[in-house]
Image (tube, rainbow, N blue to C red):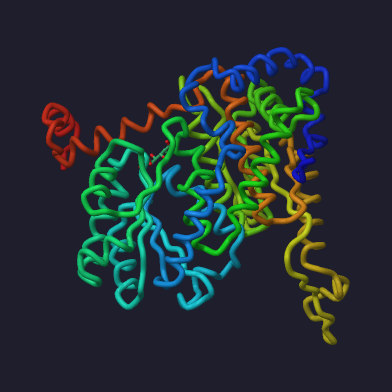
């Protein structure tokens, strides 16, 4: 059995069982395309069977490298962007204490920091300052091996590391995760003898968190990657064995969101009430946005952190344009217990809550918000997690991957390509006068005044 539950009760006023049933044969067809590998982008379906195929020698190798990094580094810099960044960050943030980024880099495990996910000059300069007096290693991740943002960050970091340790010793502190045979990173890794891991050809960036792309950083951060993989494997087996649309949560999620989309609910907001899940929402946004937003269609994935954003975006969700639906990731059991104390003076009027746990108050906020939003014509789906641990997160990741592929096929797009991301790159290269872009440079310069 799986631990994750999908609840659609608060969408029932907008989507009936009969409407869902109408999708039975369509969703079954799309499901078969995934398992039979006959749909669009079928050369990128390696993630489907991946959890069950990860072999012990890979896990052991990753654990060994994680132990080595732990023994020689206070900090590890994970360099990557998009699918080569968000999965690891989502899981590490979800599992870590909320203030782990503020620890002094002397904890039980290396502190994980990130680079190459932006080109901010201050960010990068401040990171190098921070690393000046730290022992550190670099995990550089790029499937293509040519993405500009991580390539620039890696060039700067490698120089810094080489100045600190000398070229040979620096190379021993660099772990490259890239294509098996091609790309600039692959060539550099070969020339400099970096330890390398392979991203399988048939696994795209945003579906790669269960490859070394996610597993190495997660292991270095001190988490149990075997349990993470086990959770994903459990969900893989469950979804494969369950053909009933009403019992297969990935299929049901994909169908319900497509019905809502066809009824004009073109924005899906993922809401959490657990601050450590903020980056999980970022990972989900990339997975769904990049997979479905094409051919002038697709649900726009947005994210909010509640109750924080109830005091900002809450107004819009309750009262703005009615093109929204919400998917709440609900946590049943936090790790810690915190009760509200009694206060003799009770000037804040909170004694009616004395002795109650914060999770009780949070849950009432959650339930009250869901009902208010449903009253405001915002259908609500809930994904209920018993707790946050490696196993549950493995289930959750695989559930969303499968839900995304099914949903994309029902929408009739190829969920495994991303042609739209090339447009900004072409303009950026033209503006930077990259060799090979001479014609584009001439054209774009006519469009800008200064
Ligand atoms: O999902 C994707 O394919 C993208 O988000 C990529 O992961 C991202 O662009 C980074 O690409 P690369 O790993 O080639 O550097």
In the image, residue 219 sits, relative to residue 130, either above or below, namely above
Which residue lies at the image location 80% right of the left edge and 74% below the top edge? 339
Q: Is residue 117 above or below residue 168?
A: above
* Left or right: residue 444 compared with residue 363: left
Residue farthest toward the front in the current orientation of the protein: 57
Quadrant, the N terminus: top right
Q: Residue 394: x, y in percent?
A: 64, 46
Q: Quadrant of residue 308?
A: bottom right
Is residue 434 shown left or right of residue 145? left
Displayed quadrant of residue 224: bottom right
Percent from the top left, x then y, of residue 4? 75, 44
Q: Nearer the viewer, residue 382 or 378?
A: 382
- Extreme bottom residue here? 344
Q: Is residue 226 above or below residue 181?
A: below
Viewer-proximal residue, 135 or 352? 135
Q: Residue 353: x and y, percent? A: 85, 71
Give 405 or 313, whichever is nearer the viewer.
Answer: 405
**Closer to us: 201 or 347:** 201
Quadrant including the C terminus: top left
State ligand 1's quadrant: top left
* Residue positioned 29% across, 36% down in the render: 182
Name the image quarter holding residue 342: bottom right
């Amino acid at each position: 059995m799986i631990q994750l539950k999908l609840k659609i009760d608060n969408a029932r006023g907008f989507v009936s069982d009969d409407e869902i049933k109408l999708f039975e044969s369509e969703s079954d067809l799309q499901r078969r395309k995934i398992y039979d590998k006959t749909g669009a982008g079928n050369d990128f379906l390696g993630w489907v069977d991946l959890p069950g195929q990860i072999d012990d020698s890979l896990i052991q190798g990753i654990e060994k490298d994680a132990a080595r990094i732990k023994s020689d580094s206070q900090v590890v810099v994970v360099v990557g962007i998009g699918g080569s960044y968000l999965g690891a960050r989502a899981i590490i943030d979800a599992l870590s204490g909320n203030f782990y980024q503020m620890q002094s880099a002397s904890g039980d495990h290396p502190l994980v920091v990130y680079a190459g996910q932006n080109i901010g000059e201050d960010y990068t300069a401040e990171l190098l300052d921070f690393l000046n007096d730290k022992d550190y290693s670099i995990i550089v991740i790029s499937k293509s091996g040519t993405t500009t943002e991580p390539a620039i960050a890696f060039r700067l970091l490698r120089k810094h590391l080489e100045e600190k340790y000398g070229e040979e010793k620096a190379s021993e502190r660099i772990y490259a995760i890239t294509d098996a045979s091609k790309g600039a990173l692959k060539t550099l890794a070969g020339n400099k003898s970096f330890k390398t891991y392979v991203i399988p050809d048939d696994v795209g960036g945003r579906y790669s968190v269960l490859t070394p792309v996610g597993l190495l950083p997660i292991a270095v951060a001190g988490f149990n990657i075997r349990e993470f993989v086990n959770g994903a494997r459990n969900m893989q087996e469950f979804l494969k064995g369950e053909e009933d649309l009403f019992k297969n949560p990935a299929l049901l999620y994909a169908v319900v969101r497509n019905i809502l989309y066809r009824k004009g609910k073109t924005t899906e907001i993922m809401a959490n009430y657990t601050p450590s899940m903020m980056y999980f929402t970022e990972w989900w946004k990339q997975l769904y946005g990049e997979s479905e937003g094409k051919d002038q269609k697709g649900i726009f994935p947005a994210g909010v952190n509640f109750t924080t954003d109830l005091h900002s975006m809450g107004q819009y969700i309750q009262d703005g344009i009615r093109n929204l639906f919400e998917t709440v990731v609900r946590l049943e059991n936090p790790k810690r217990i915190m009760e509200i104390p009694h206060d003799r003076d009770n000037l804040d009027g909170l004694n009616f809550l004395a002795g109650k746990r914060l999770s009780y108050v949070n849950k009432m906020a959650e339930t009250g918000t869901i009902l208010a939003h449903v009253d405001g014509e915002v259908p609500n789906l809930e994904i209920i997690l018993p707790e946050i641990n490696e196993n549950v997160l493995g289930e959750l990741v695989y559930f969303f991957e499968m839900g995304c592929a099914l949903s994309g096929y029902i929408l009739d797009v190829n969920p495994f390509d991303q042609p739209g991301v090339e447009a900004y790159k072409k303009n950026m290269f033209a503006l930077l006068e990259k060799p090979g872009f001479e014609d584009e440079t001439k054209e774009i310069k006519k469009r800008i005044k200064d």
